[in-house]
Image (spheres, coloured by chain):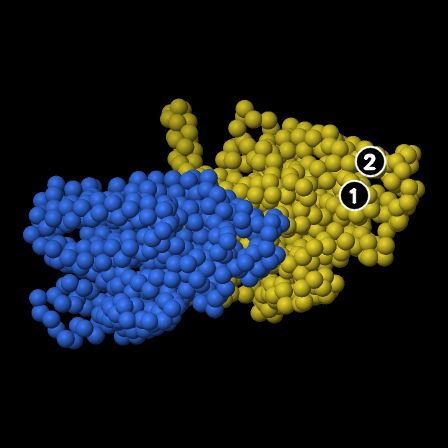
Amino acid sequence: MNPTGGFVLPVILALPLLGALFVMLTPRGEGTIARGVGLVVSTATFVMSLLVLRYFDGKAAGYQLTTDAVWVKSLGIHMKLGVDGISLWLVLLTTFLTPLTLLAATKSIEKHVREFVAAFLVLETGMLGAFVSLDLFVFYVFWEVMLIPMYLMIGIWGGQRRLYASIKFVLYTMVGSLLMLVAIFYLYVQHGQVTGIYTTELTHITATGQTLGLAHLVLPHDAQVWCFAAFALAFAIKIPLFPLHTWLPDAHVEAPTPGSVILAGVLLKLGIYGFIRLAMPLFPHGAAVLAPYISILAVIGIVYGAVVAFAQDDVKKLVAYSSVSHLGFCALGLFSLTVSGIEGSIYAMLSHGLTTGGLFLGIGMLYERRHTRRLAEYGGIWKQMPVFSGLYLIIVMGSAGLPGLSGFVGEFLSLFGTFNAADTFPSNWPHYLPSPRLLAAIATTGVILGAIYLLFMFQKVFFGPLDKGKNGHLPDVSIREKAVLLPLVVLIFVLGFFPRPFLAKMEPSVKAFIADYHKKLAEPDGPARIMSAEGSPTAIKAKLEGAAAKLDAAAARMGGNAGGQP
Amino acid sequence: MNFATGDALYIAPILILALAGLLLVLAEAFYTGKDRTALAGLAVAGGVAAAVASIALYRHMDPGTHRYLYGEMLVADRTGYALSALLSVVIALAALVAPAHMRAHDWAIGEYFGILLLAGTGMLMLAHASHLATVFLGVETMSIGVYVMTALRRRSRRGNEAAMKYFLMGAFATGFLLYGMALVYGATGTTSLVAVRERLASGNLALLTVGTFMMVAAFAFKVAAVPFHMWAPDAYEGAPTPVTAFMAAAVKVAAVAAMIRVFGQFLGGEKLPYGTLGWASPMVVLAAITITVGNIAAIRQDNVKRMLAYSSISHGGVLLVGLCAMGLGSPSGQSALVYYLIAYALTTMGAFAVVSYVGSKQNERLGIDDWAGLASKHPAAALAMTVCLLSLGGMPPTGGFFAKWYVFKSAMDAQDQQLLWVTIIGVVNSAVSIFYYLKLVTAMYFKDATGEFTPSRSAGLTFTMALCAVVVLAMGLFPTTWLGFGG
């Protein structure tokens, strides 16, 4: 418990929500006022979120800046918030991208500006809430609350096929999350029946100092597999893992630029984050059983996304498929369950948030000038917009994973971790599946393919002859657009050159995550029970019995020897 | 049977409604003014008075205690008064939304208000019933009133057809109910549910089983559970919208309230007292079919009232899940049901109030496409409708979400394999339901208006829409207070 700084998280959750209410009170049709309010509120949220860094102890594992308020007493639901090294940077990424995106949305959103800003701010609260909630119920509420503003964003401000895309987006996400809800019920009721205390908190300290909570409950092995599968479906759709990705290209193409930025920049990360924070710690046995298959799907996604991206003529679709490929790296690194793999996974998420956010913002700027997203319509833009082209080149290179830029660090660490996973996954990796090493090798081709399609795209748009008439008189980036792109470019450099401070803050939490995971995985199969700090009595007993058996065997061998030479 | 005068205090809400209803019938007869909608005031006052009395009695009763009235005819407890208060509020709201619709569609019939309150009397009786006779009396008082209300628009062919269908099938269900009661009486030798509970173990198993199954079928008709639901979409579509709102909200609440009494409290228990052939097994199956069929049928509807009718059918299925959980000994089953009923009734009331608001004399606007662009013309109504639809779909942060969570949690708590499966079916169906609820949201927000809206405005309608939307949100954000009502 860190009493100082506990106020920060509630404040950054409440600010956008209050801002949304306030925006709805501004006069109708006065877009500038609504935008101004939105910018001020989201910037204030970002500044407040920097306080998280100030209070955060980078050397400690576990949750910090925690607050706890009872929400529904009779159901044991707590509004419990906190960050650790895993969620810290994702929170900052969210608060950082929101004002930039609102600033960029000046031209692309022209109707119902007030409602747009309000929806956007509600979305921010939803995303932040999902990242910082330490109560499964509260997490689920925020997870669902995000859906509605995003649905409205695609449906109201989207492109031609927005109705189809918006419904597809909602249905895909809902189907996944509802099965997760069933697993949550199961977990919740099991906990209630085992301990007599119904709570949805991950960690619940009773009045007598006993540590309970869903994170400390060990389920029977087959139940773990089912529950993990249910959670995994929800998160895999969100990531999205191949073959559940088909909603993403539609959603991206139809969403307005700000929607795409937030969708790619933050929403997709919630899938990976859900795995780290919930699915894997809650059901380690399930994770161990299904990890090989998820890793394989991730690798298929990496290669498939890259190949399909190459074939696209629509820039937005290209970047959408590139997201499928990049998020594959995140999933792969995570399921390697090595320190470097998981750190790489988180780092790749940060980098993807910045670079893909930047890619979409840039596409939006081009679209506002030319009103097309077809690659074939562009060419020779560099001559017209040199500053923009230079900035965009850096973003593209960052996304492609050029060393020295942000994308490289994350992907390298993920692959490195996966390559080494063979040492941490010796027993339960089925022999008939490709080994982690082979998977890492295949995934590496994704990096090369990524460079190919991104550079190909860059070449088609910015180089070549300026032969399309409409491209002749495009103004270069305005001051406002520079203000949007520059912070991204700077951060892409910073993350590329100085990964150490970022990684250092993650490391204790990642190590604790792995240690907890293995401790819980070591629990033998059996009825649902609470795991004590040093492992459950049955686990200790099993360990002792194992040791005794070894002693017996040794004694028998010695006895045998003794018997052999009378 | 001794008529203790002290007991009269405990049935004050029922008496108030009955008196107000009779007064309204008289007033209607002697009323000389042209505008019959003026009678709404008295009806609203009656409903509010009954609600106030219910709340006062709710506070008067100590939690966990109950008191039998008139020799086990009725039972007074907190759950009963919570449901009475809910029913009275719904009755008041049904009276409040009616005048605007009457004026817009030329059916200013004064009897509506009198029948509304008298049917309500039967409903309140069901919430307190602890005797097969009062159950029957309540069901019939309620049903006959609602049959008449469905047919109030005499010149509407759809209305007449709907009422006829409703009445014929209702009469059939009454037969089932009576026969079931007779068999239970045959098995136990008593019609007092309190005594029936005591004699369950010694009663004739075959008679009891057949009897309870028949009663399940009869109530399945009243809550429109598949396959006894055929009347619902037609009746909902054919009846005037305020009547539809009343049917969807209040009739379902009253029927489930009666089931809580009959099946949950008196024929249920730790494990069903008469072996595996308990009523819960068929009811679980009914619940699963009802949820699924209701939702799938709703997808195909392009009439808002029919869509809401099928949605209400599937909600009936969820309520049956809660009943099974309660019957199989889940400790939180009853409070889950009461919370669900409050959330469901107010949400439905709000949704139909918006339906009533949007329509006008020239165009009743019942097609989903007719709602296109409502958000840009009448943002407040669209917002209220969206809140109600999200609540019906079980999306946070609305009361509907908590209600689903609570019912399914209590179902899992019963530790029964069948209930686990029906929970999975129910939760997956929520995704299906989101699809058709969002169809309407999509029309309101994403499509452009085809013509001018000329809504039927009235202060009562606006108040109802606002109240329901706000309460539904409050139930989601601050559920603690509301969770306590179930006892």
User: Residue A193, image x and y in percent?
Assistant: 34, 52
How many discs mark residues in the rendered view?
2
Q: Please determine whether, in this image, residue B367 is positioned above or below residue B457.
A: above
Q: Say which element carries label 1.
A: loop
Locate residue A93: give its quadrant: bottom right
Look at label 2 and name its amino acid.
Answer: Glu
The structure residue drawn at horizontal position 53% and vertical position 42%, both measured from the top left corner, is A171
Quarter of the image with the N terminus of chain A in it: bottom right
Q: Say which element carries label 2.
A: helix
The structure residue drawn at horizontal position 9% and vertical position 69%, both measured from the top left corner, is B2
Q: Earlier in the sequence, mark 2 or mark 1?
A: 1
User: Residue A218, image x and y in percent?
Assistant: 43, 47
Residue B350 visible in image: no
Protein chain holding label 2: A
User: Residue B361, image x and y in percent?
Assistant: 48, 56
The structure residue drawn at horizontal position 39% and vertical position 68%, both measured from the top left corner, is B35
Tag 2 and tag 1 share a subunit: yes
Look at label 1 and name its amino acid.
Answer: His
Chain A rendering hue: yellow
Locate residue B9: give its quadrant: bottom left
Label 2: few (<14), some or many (≥20) within 10 Å?
Answer: some
Viewer-nearest residue: A406 or B105: B105
Label 1: few (<14), some or many (≥20) within 10 Å?
Answer: few
> In this figure, which residue is indicated by the disc labeled 2?
A377
Left or right of B73? Residue A148 is: right
Viewer-nearest residue: B167 or A302: B167
Quarter of the image with the C terminus of chain A in it: top left
> In this figure, which residue is indicated by the disc labeled 1?
A371
Chain B rendering hue: blue
Q: Please determine whether, in this image, residue B130 is positioned above or below residue A359.
A: below
